[in-house]
Image (cartoon, rainbow, N blue to C red):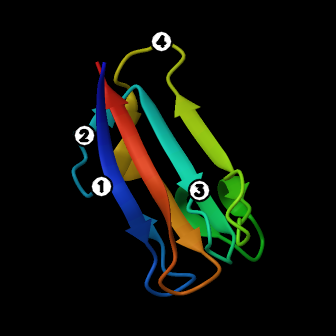
Amino acid sequence: MTANPLGRVNVATPGTLVQLSSNTSLRASKIFFQVIPGLTGKGYVGKSGMVRATLANVIRVLWPNSAGGISDSFYLESQDDADVLNLSEYYIDMDVAGEGLLVTYWTE
């Protein structure tokens, strides 16, 4: 299994979803999302059409860690342990402009 770190994926304007990849053939067996210590706004992981205000299409809300302690994180994982998660189907959003999440995906 190969780890493919995307690094910090930022949201320039809250409410404007950031797609993990525009490549519709990029698939993974796992996708990991983590709050970056010291940031202040909540992060949202979801699908197309995600709306922070109503939580429509939100998969997970990640809470900020402004004090720099343990960071909230979330894994999406294929039940088959195969590369079936299409990165282009997943988006992030943030409450604070310019903040983001640490994102890594794994391929077989």
Alpha carbon distance from label 4 to label 2: 17 Å
Q: Residues within 10 Å of mark 1 (few under 14, many from 20)?
A: some
Residue to which mark 1 is pinned? 21
Q: Are marks 2 and 3 in contact (CB under 8 Å)?
A: no
Alpha carbon distance from label 2 to label 1: 8 Å
Q: Are marks 4 and 2 in contact (CB under 8 Å)?
A: no
Q: Quadrant of residue 76?
A: top right
- As helix, strand or loop, the secondary structure at mark 3 comes to strand
Q: Residues within 10 Å of mark 3 (few under 14, many from 20)?
A: many
Q: Are marks 2 and 1 in contact (CB under 8 Å)?
A: yes
Residue to which mark 3 is pinned? 45
- As helix, strand or loop, the secondary structure at mark 4 comes to loop
Q: Amino acid at mark 1?
A: Ser
Specify which label sits upstream in the sequence, 2 or 3.
Answer: 2
Specify which label sits upstream in the sequence, 4 or 3.
Answer: 3
Mark number displayed over residue 80: 4
Alpha carbon distance from label 4 to label 3: 21 Å
Specify which label sits upstream in the sequence, 4 or 1.
Answer: 1
Specify which label sits upstream in the sequence, 1 or 3.
Answer: 1
Residue to which mark 2 is pinned? 26
Q: Which x, y percent locates residue 81? A: 44, 14
- As helix, strand or loop, the secondary structure at mark 1 comes to loop
